[in-house]
Amino acid sequence: MDQTFFVLGVAFAFISVAAGAFGAHALKSHLDSGMLAVFETGVRYQMYHALALIGVSWACNRWPSTLIPAGGWLLACGSLVFSGSLYLLCLTGAKWPGAVTPLGGLALLAGWLCLALGALQAR
């Protein structure tokens, strides 16, 4: 499981860097400053959670608990939904992804909570 979260974290970080470069160069002339800021929020949160997933790969061995991988999966899914919906909102102009974004945020919050409880449980 630790290897899975490490690879996911690295892949999310790679995509975040690519998306950031795409936003800074290709989207700058196509989006207004407000939507560009929304896109950048997606990139920023994706990178934060990419690094968190790398940390989860370490935590899986440090504190063996079913809550640690559960937290990792919640972070991975939450990052996909949160950042992905912001990317879709900016790239397509559709409004519905904005309604999905908070669900990704809730998954991220639940993931962080699982990680904290898993570390405490495994003491």
Image (cartoon, helix red, strand yellow):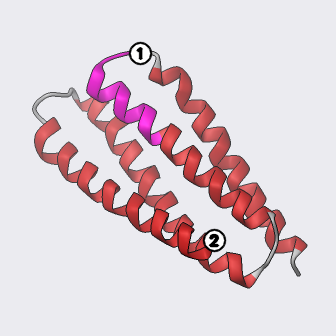
30 or 75: nearer the eye?
Answer: 75
Q: In the drawing, does residue 43 fall left or right of residue 27?
A: right
**Tag 2 secondary structure:** loop
Name the residue at the top extreme.
95
Write down the quadrant of residue 36 in the picture: top left
**Boundaries of the magenta span:** 83-95
Instruction: Classify 10 Å Cα crowding around label 2: few (below 14), some (14-19), many (20 and above).
Output: few
Magenta segment, prevailing SS (helix, strand or loop) = helix
Q: Quadrant of the C terminus?
A: bottom right
Q: Residue at x 79, y 62 (%)?
A: 67
Residue 57 at x, y percent in the picture:
59, 74
Residue receiving disc 2: 1
Instruction: Classify 10 Å Cα crowding around label 1: few (below 14), some (14-19), many (20 and above).
Output: few
Q: Amino acid at mark 1?
A: Lys
Relative height, residue 54 to residue 72 (above, below)? below
**Tag 1 secondary structure:** loop
